[in-house]
Amino acid sequence: MNVPLVLPQFLDRAVSLYGEKAAVYCDERVFTYKELNARVNQLSHGLRDLGIAKGDRVAYLAPNTLEMLEGFYGVFQLGAIMVPLNIRLTPADYVFILNHSESRVLFVDQDLYHLIQPVKTQLETVEHIIVHYKDQETNETDYNRWVDSYTPERFERADLHEDDVCSLLYTSGTTGNPKGVMLTHRNNYLHALSSMHHLRVSDRDVYLHVLPMFHVNGWGSPFYYTANGATHICLKKATPEAIFQAMKDHKVSILHMAPTVLNSLLQYNEENAPALEQEVRVVIAGSAPPPAFVRRVEEELGWEFIQVYGMTESTPLSLVSTIRPHISHLPQNEQYRIKAKAGYPMIGCDVRVVKENGKEVAHDGKEIGEVVTRSHGVMKGYWKNEQATMETIRNGWLHTGDMGTVDEYGHIDIVDRKKDIIISGGENISSIEVEGVLYEHPSIREAAVIAVPHEKWGETPHAYVVLRENQNVSEQDIINFSREKLAHFKAVTGVTFVQELPKTASGKIQKVHLRNEYWSSHGKTGRFVN
């Protein structure tokens, strides 16, 4: 008889093989895998007592805490569906998501309760609000008292099937309301097996939760680190100082984050040079970094840089960019260039770059097409949105909306989002390529490039730039720098200096806000859409 691929098996394995090992550190608390499992059982018993059954939605609005981590397994044991909420949304967004998902229970961290309190009366299906770390002023159920009132004894699980939906993750809705991505136990289980192989996860790893768990479950971290009996370090606020301190205290060996967060760690390292004795792997997804960025991480921090690529709709990871043996003879600079790419397909993923006619692009690093994938990770669909599902999954292929090339080694390089390609005088310009050059300027800390209207060329690249401290650089200096490094038609034609760039909760730069800001500041009423 086949064993169904369901996620509670991962915690079962950890309890069986690593029961007395430290599983989770959170604040000053530490829990073994047996103790974590006991808390998970208490949570499951509590949810059943509230009437939660298979298929019901249970929402979480929380940072990276023990309570968030145990929520996955506690919810899954009932066959219920976890709805992790982005902590950087507005109260109106939460109203839409909670009502659209028809969530019945909401767990919320005290620090985030102010986002829910003003809209409580608008929540149509939420029957219970339970608060982590509740203070005396908040008139809701206290999580610790509530969960401690239930037995830690074994929980009789629901009849789970691998094709059951277990996670409902809402993507940011920049062109309308967010869409709920339905991921199954099978999606997450097979994604975990593939990811743990490519990231070389083992029971000796100490994993620091920097990437938010609500972000595609922190790229699956509650699953494959648990399955391997690795140790989780929860960090509520991921400041550079807190990250380095946690890495030192717990001898962290691996962490996942967005490029902007890693950039802040490089800056902190420049000023403070914190010493770490252990070997460290840092896993990065998001906009492709320039090769110079990869070099700094590996040479200044001494960490192994691993670029990955994916999206919520594919659970998420599909590509990984490591140096395989047959290209390890390449010069170091060339290896950095390859490591900066999105990478080659992970096991179980068929990823291609295709032209409008569906034919694959040439493997020459030049011809551009759309990245499409079919894999064990492709979502079941969008929750209550069949039209959007059909638009995204066509003929069995998930269309990512990312444009890329493929080099002679089979590495895919993301050149831009479809909507971010700049077309100037009939020539396609990758905003990512222009940004990569700007990051080489010694005075630039962060940069983002968008298309702006131009009378002669239709549109040209415009840069939004954050300077390093105590740097004084003019707009013309940066324009000249880009013209020296790029073909002139690719060079920026204008620069806006800002204190910071707008970012999502996972650290991705939100170019739609930059486009809107540009139009607003130039007296236009039109709006770009993301």
Image (tube, rainbow, N blue to C red):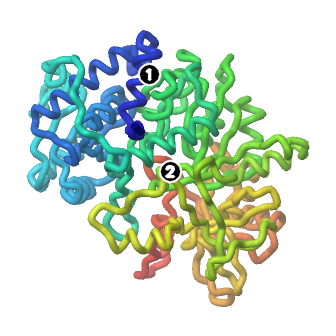
- Choose between 182 and 22: the one closer to the eye: 182
Residue 348 appears left or right of 187: right
Q: Taking 453 as reference, is 491 left or right?
A: right
Above or below, 416 against 141 in this view is below
Q: How many marks?
A: 2
Name the mark on residue 14.
1
* Residue at the image position 82 percent from the left and 60 percent from the top: 408
CA separation, marks 2 and 1?
23 Å
* Rendered position, 203 above or below 456: above
Q: Evaluate whether residue 427 shows in this view.
A: yes
**Dot 2: within a 10 Å radius of its alpha carbon, few (fewer than 14), some, or many (20 or more) residues?**
many
| Residue 265 rendering spot, x and y as whole percentages | 61, 35
Position of residue 211 measured from the top left corner of the image (x, y, whole percent): 48, 39
Q: Quick check: marks 2 and 1 in contact, CB under 8 Å?
A: no
Name the residue type under label 1: Ala
The answer to whether residue 87 is visible is: no
Identify the element where label 2 is drawn. Answer: loop
Q: Is residue 412 left or right of residue 530?
A: right
Residue placed at 42% from the left, 32% from the top?
Answer: 237
Residue 136 falls in image quadrant? top left
Q: Nearer the viewer, residue 445 or 230?
A: 230
Residue 240 in the image: above or below residue 216: above
Give the residue type at disc 2: Pro
Residue 316: mark in rendering: 2
Viewed as shown, does residue 160 lie left or right of 290?
A: left
The percent position of residue 192, horizontal first and vertical second, equals 51, 39
**Chain-order first, disc 2 or disc 1:** 1
Residue drawn at x 30%, y 68% as measured from the top left: 385
Tell us which disc is closer to us: 2 or 1.
Answer: 1
